[in-house]
Every structure is written in C-alpha cells, then in structure tokens.
Image (cartoon, rainbow, N blue to C red):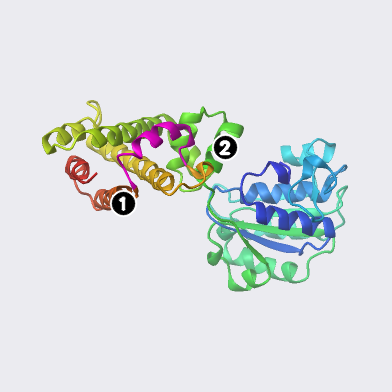
C-alpha cells in the first residue's frame, strides 16, 4: 500500500515520505499507537517507497501528499511493490508473535544474521517487527547491538501498541512516531474502501470503534447497525415525548424478545455508544461546525431536524447522561434499570 492510500495520519505519512526522499531515514524506528490504526500499513508503505522501481516524486500529481516538500512514494504497480504487498519480497522481513503469543530470541537472531548481509535485490532491506512488545526480554536484548550499530543497508521498524512494555534500552535507540486514533469518518472510509462495507454499516461500526479499524472489523457490523438505528429512534421519540410513562414504553422497545440477559446488556451498551456518537454530532451541528467532522454524516438530514429539539445545552446534558449510563452498565447495573433511567434524562 503506497503512502497516498493510507487513511489518516497525514503528518506522519508526510514525515516518512520526506525522510525517504531526502535519504535521511533513521536506521531504526518505533511506530507506536493504538492497535488497529494503520501502523503496520505505514511500515509496509515505507518499505515500498524505499524500494520502488519507479517511485513517484513531488512533481507527480498522483503523489501529492504535502505541498512544497520533497516527496517520495511507491508506484504500487512495479514488480517490487507487488511482491512487498504480497509479503514475498526476500528483502522485506516481517516478524510477528507466533502461536505462543511471543517473539522468541531465535527469530530475532535469525533476522539479525540476515541483516548483516547486503540485500539480495532491494535498495534497502526493511525488517518490520510487528507487536514488538511481545518479544521476550532476551530477544529484545539481542536486538540492542543491531539497533545501536545497524547495517548500513537495513532499516528496522518496530511496531507496537504498548511501547512502554519494551525495554527502556530498546526504546532509547528508536526514534518514536506516535500514531493517534482515527476519526470515525476515517474508519468508515477504510471500511467502505477496503472491506466492502455498505455506508450505514460502516458508519455504525466506526462510531463504536474508538478510532481503530481493527476494532471495527472485530465486531458484528449488523448488530452495530441495529444499535445505531435504535439510538436514532430513541432520539426521535424522546424529542417528541415528554410524558414519563410514555418514555418508559420507549425504553422497553430497546430490548428484543429473543436475547439473553448478557446479549441484552451487550446490545444496550452498543446502542448507548451509538447514541453518544449521535449526540456528539448534534453538538457539532449546534455550533455550526464543519459537517465533514460528523461521525454519522449519512444521517446529517435527520440530525439537522433533531437539532431543533436538542440544542447545545440539551445535547451536552444527554451526552453526560449516556456516559453515566455506560458507567453503570460496566458496574453491572441491570440493563432495564439503566434504560429506564436514561430515557427520563434525555
């Protein structure tokens, strides 16, 4: 995947691209940040950019990552790029935890031996250690000398969602690039572009993903789409109904008839997270913010209608109530009690 196809992280992508263009890339890097936000993809994109046979530069329209800066990006089509994408390039080595959940010292020693030789065909050998924090301490210690005096033709990229679990001596030898969580819009874009999600399912999954594409892919999008639909109905109904007894009937409608208590709890939590996302969007609309910042952009017309009932003050109160409801669920409060309380607060 070329740099230009990475979703989000534009400042870090531009930094890596400029470093590759100027041949000023450090011999070792630590890509740190939440799980599932694209760190490994950035490492692979860097390997492609360093070894592309027909790289794009700042003068190529297709590579326009940043303005007025030297840029190098992979073409994504040459033999080298295609082999890196398939994971079969002999000079791009990826290590990740095995069945035991750890990276053993033997694997690290093997890659250190390989890195000591000139690349077979690439300009730069790239060693990507994914989930580097899973390396046992002996394996991390074995890396120290190589990280301190790396072979001139090799680059070591450590990828970690828990960088502080690495030995301090390893951390000190690797400049750290901090990847943040993606926006809901960016997660939805990735789900639609790369994983074939329909927009409603993508938006629902993104709202629940906490900025992680990996997390969005790990849950059932159909359940999340149902949860978002339930949250939308809840807002529409509470906007029209103020009588307490009628609101209690609204709460009953949140629960299906064929769910176990555990499934009810899980679905209510998903509905509350979706409700929190919708209320956030209502707050943004109330401040005339840029609509592109909406997490649920496909529901903009619905949200615009609701904004007449949920002004900024009410949206903030409702948002705080949803947060308290989620906290109560986490403390094992009864699902129906939480739902009854919440509909009275909206």
Closer-to-camera residue (306/134) = 306
Q: Is residue 32 magenta?
A: no
The answer to whether mark 1 and mark 2 are in CB contact below 8 A is no
Q: Quadrant of residue 102?
A: bottom right
Q: In the depicted view, which residue is nearer to us: 314 or 38?
A: 314
Which quadrant of the figure contains the N terminus? Answer: top right
What residue lies at 28% left-to-right and 51% top-to-bottom? Answer: 317
Quadrant of image for the C terminus: top left
**In this rendering, position of residue 297 left or right of residue 247:** right
Label at residue 189? 2
C-alpha distance separating marks 1 and 2: 31 Å
Q: Residue at position x 60%, y 58% from top?
A: 132
Tell me the residue at 46%/30% (across/down).
Answer: 200
Inspect this view and state whether residue 110 appears.
Answer: no
Query: Which badge, 1 or 2, is on the more N-terminal residue?
Result: 2
Q: Which residues are magenta?
A: 295-311
Quick check: 90 left or right of 32? right
| Secondary element at image label 1 | helix
310 is within the stretch colored magenta? yes
The mark lying in front, picked from 1 and 2, is 1
- Horizontal relation, residue 81 to residue 254: left or right: right
Secondary structure at numbered mark 2: helix
**Image coords of residue 230 (percent x, y):** 31, 32
Q: Quadrant of residue 227?
A: top left
> At x 53% / y 52%, what residue is drawn?
181
Pointer 1: what residue? 313
Above or below 302: residue 121: below
Where residue 27 sits in the image (x, y, percent)? 77, 64
Residue 271 appears in the picture as rendered = yes
């Amino acid at each position: 995947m070329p740099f230009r196809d990475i979703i989000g992280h534009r400042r870090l992508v531009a930094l890596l691209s400029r470093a590759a263009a100027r041949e000023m890339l450090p011999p070792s890097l630590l890509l740190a940040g939440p799980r599932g936000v694209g760190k490994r993809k950035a490492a692979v994109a860097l390997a492609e950019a360093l070894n592309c046979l027909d790289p794009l530069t700042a003068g190529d329209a297709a590579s326009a990552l940043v303005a007025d800066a030297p840029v190098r990006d992979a073409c994504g089509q040459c033999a080298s790029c295609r082999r890196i994408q398939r994971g079969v390039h002999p000079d791009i080595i990826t290590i990740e935890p095995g069945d035991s959940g750890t990276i053993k010292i033997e694997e690290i020693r093997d890659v250190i031996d390989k890195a000591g030789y000139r690349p077979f065909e690439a300009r730069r050998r790239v060693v990507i250690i994914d989930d580097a924090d899973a390396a046992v301490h002996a394996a991390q210690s074995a890396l120290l000398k190589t990280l301190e005096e790396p072979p001139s033709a090799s680059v070591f990229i450590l990828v970690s969602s828990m960088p502080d679990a690495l030995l301090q001596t390893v951390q000190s030898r690797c400049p750290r690039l901090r990847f943040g969580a993606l926006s809901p819009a960016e997660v939805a874009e990735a789900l639609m572009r790369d994983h074939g999600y329909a927009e409603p399912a993508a938006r629902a999954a993104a709202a629940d993903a906490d900025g992680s594409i990996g997390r969005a892919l790990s849950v059932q999008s159909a359940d999340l789409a149902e949860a978002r639909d339930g949250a939308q109905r809840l807002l529409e109904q509470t906007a029209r109904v103020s009588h307490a007894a009628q609101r209690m009937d609204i709460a009953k409608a949140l629960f299906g008839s064929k769910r176990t208590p555990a499934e009810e709890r899980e679905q209510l939590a998903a509905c509350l997270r979706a409700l929190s996302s919708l209320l956030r969007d209502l707050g943004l609309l109330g401040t005339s913010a840029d609509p592109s910042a909406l997490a649920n952009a496909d529901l903009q017309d619905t949200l615009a209608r609701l904004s007449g009932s949920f002004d900024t003050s009410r949206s903030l109160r409702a948002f705080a109530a949803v947060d308290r409801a989620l906290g109560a669920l986490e403390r094992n409060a009864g699902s129906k009690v939480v739902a009854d309380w919440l509909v009275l607060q909206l």
